[in-house]
Image: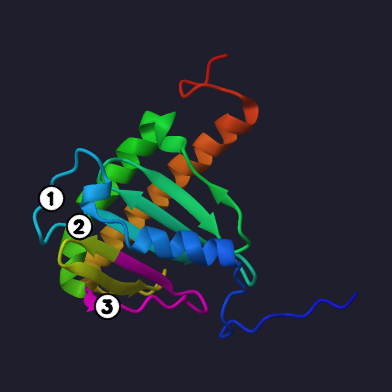
Amino acid sequence: MAVIRRSPLDPYPVTPKYLQTRNSALHITPAQLKGIKVKSDEVYGIVIDVPMGPEIMVTMVCFLNGAANLYFNTGGEYTGASMRYKAVVQAARNLVVNATPLKAKAKRTSSFPLPVGNTHFVYLLTKRGVYKTEITPGQFTEEDKEKRVVYYLYQQMMGALRMAQMRDAEGLPEDGKK
């Protein structure tokens, strides 16, 4: 069986389930997040499309209430970790709270294309609409402080989710003790 290599400029292959969950995440309102009160210009959620290789892309979704989920373009997902792990909740809140300054580098959008190549698409959810910016790892300038901060925080978020995923696989509680 021949392996067909995908060009880095081709869109990622996606499943209908992935597109549906990603679209739902991009349209969640603060009212759907119980107990969350935000000002109209504050970010209450962040949706980040992260290319992981030539065939795999993950969309990370985090909200101010600490909810955090991963959706894979193949249809897989990792959800519910924030219900079991304080570290996931803390990382998600930290990411979302610190994403508001990035809005100044973003443009309001109603279009949600998928990334190509190594570019990460970052969507910031506010009461006034969704704002989009792009982050290309390793290509930051001095003017990109807000992007560097959010990039660093979503790497921490990915680490917290990965640790939770490993603990789930081993049947360990958050503190690592059996």
The reply to whether callout 1 and callout 3 are in contact (CB within 8 Å) is no
The reply to whether callout 3 and callout 2 are in contact (CB within 8 Å) is no
Is residue 119 within the magenta segment?
A: yes
Kindly identify the amino acid type of the residue bearing the numbered disc 3: Thr
Tell which residue pokes out farthest to the right in this image: 1
CA gap between label 1 and label 3 equals 20 Å
Place residue 108 in its image quadrant: bottom left
Local crowd size for mark 1, using a 10 Å CA cut-off: few (<14), some (14–19), many (≥20): some
CA gap between label 3 and label 2 equals 14 Å
Asked whether 57 or 137 is in front, the reply is 57
Q: Which residue is mark 3?
A: 109
The reply to whether callout 1 and callout 2 are in contact (CB within 8 Å) is yes
Q: Could you tell me which residue is drawn at 44 percent across and 75 percent down? A: 119
Q: Position of residue 51 (x, y in %)?
A: 52, 67
Q: Could you tell me which residue is drawn at 58 percent across and 35 percent down? A: 166
Q: Which residues are magenta?
A: 106-123
Q: Which residue is mark 1?
A: 38
Kindly identify the amino acid type of the residue bearing the numbered disc 1: Val
